[in-house]
Amino acid sequence: MKNPVDSPTECGDTVATVTGYSEGVIEMAKKAKQYFSLLTKTDGVWSVQFGDYDRECVEQERDDSYSDEKCRIIKTDDTQSAIDAAVAKLNAA
């Protein structure tokens, strides 16, 4: 597979090749990280209100802003599709 950094830009210039990293390191960098989302339930529907990589930060947001509402903190990958799927699963239950 051709490395996208080796292809010419729209201006015709060639972008320099990134070297020094093994394929394994590059693949690890592409993997998603843990992400915490603060959800609230309104009219029977869960929705995301806040998210962060640090659970303590999400807990603080919950305590500061949503203490009187029904809340839940979920952990997913940091991709939007993973977050959307987890919220959809909760709403389907």
Image (spheres, rainbow, N blue to C red):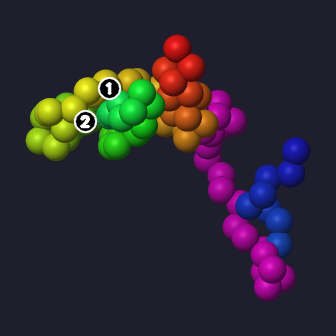
Which mark, by number, is residue 73? 1
Q: Amino acid at mark 1?
A: Ile
> Few, some or many C-alpha atoms within 10 Å of disc 2 (few <14, some 14-19, many ≥20)?
many
Q: What x and y, as percent, mark residue 50? A: 33, 43
The residue that label 2 is drawn on is 58
Q: What x and y, as percent, mark residue 36? A: 36, 31
Cα separation, mark 1 vs mark 2, equals 8 Å
Left or right, 26 with respect to 69, comes to: right
Q: Amino acid at mark 2?
A: Val
Q: Is residue 63 at all visible to an observer of this figure? A: yes
Q: Is residue 20 magenta?
A: yes
Q: Based on the displayed image, in which of its 4 quarters is residue 38 positioned?
A: top left
Kindly identify the residue that appears in the image at 14 percent across and 33 percent down: 67
Which secondary structure dominates the residues rendered in magenta? loop
Give, as a single range, the part of the protein colored magenta.
Answer: 9-35
Q: Are marks 1 and 2 in contact (CB under 8 Å)?
A: yes
